[in-house]
Image (spheres, rainbow, N blue to C red):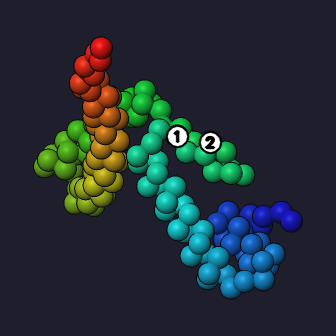
């Protein structure tokens, strides 16, 4: 059975499972939502996540650092547009929305990269065990 172009992957998955398992679509959707929410939370704590049947997903520190640089440049450009007195009100409003979204992404990536740095410093900060004789 092929997925219709007009249907999202999630909706297709829910409908297919509901038919195969002869269960209510709302119940299947709740389970799917829970699974992906749990996967998202696990990805916040780990660098990789494997979902059986979907594949393995990795958090790439180098790409995140590069993306943070791009987002900071975009943030500065949006702030410059907002502060410019010659900019129209419509352009300022759209720039504010873009700025909010950009700041949210910056916070997300910053949190993830800072958390990884803390893990590394915690591992290195372990005390040496006394030598037993």
> From what the image shows, is residue 111 above or below residue 7?
above
- The C terminus lies in which quarter of the figure? top left
**Res 17 quadrant in image:** bottom right
Q: Can you give x and y, in whole percent of width and height, for residue 1 in the image?
A: 86, 65
Real-space Cα separation, disc 1 to disc 2, in angstroms: 7 Å
Q: Can you give x and y, in whole percent of width and height, for residue 83 in the image?
A: 14, 47
Asked if residue 32 lies left or right of residue 122, the reply is right
Indicate which disc, 1 or 2, sits on the residue closer to the N terminus: 1
Q: Nearer the viewer, residue 82 or 68?
A: 68
Asked if residue 91 lies left or right of residue 41, the reply is left
> From what the image shows, is residue 12 above or below residue 42?
below
Q: Nearer the viewer, residue 2 or 128?
A: 128
SS class, disc 1: strand
| Residue at the (43%, 55%) spot, across then down | 41
Q: Residue 79: in sight, yes or no?
A: yes
| Residue at the (57%, 42%) spot, across then down | 57
Q: Disc 1, disc 2: CB below 8 Å?
A: yes
Q: Can you give x and y, in whole percent of width and height, for residue 34 in the image?
A: 53, 68
Asked if residue 46 lies left or right of residue 99, the reply is right
Identify the residue under disc 1: 48
SS class, disc 2: strand
Identify the residue under disc 2: 56
Farthest residue in the right direction? 1
């Amino acid at each position: 059975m092929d997925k219709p172009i007009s249907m999202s992957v999630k909706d297709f998955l829910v409908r297919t499972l509901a038919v195969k398992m002869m269960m209510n679509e709302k119940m299947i959707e709740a389970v799917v939502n829970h699974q992906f929410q749990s996967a998202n939370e696990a990805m916040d704590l780990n660098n990789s996540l494997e979902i059986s049947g979907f594949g393995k997903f990795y958090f790439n520190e180098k790409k995140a650092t590069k993306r943070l640089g791009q987002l900071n440049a975009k943030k500065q450009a949006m702030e410059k547009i907002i502060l410019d007195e010659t900019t129209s009100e419509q352009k300022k409003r759209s720039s504010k929305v873009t700025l909010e979204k950009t700041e949210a992404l910056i916070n997300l990536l910053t949190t993830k990269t800072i958390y990884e740095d803390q893990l590394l410093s915690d591992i290195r900060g372990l005390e040496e065990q006394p030598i037993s004789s």
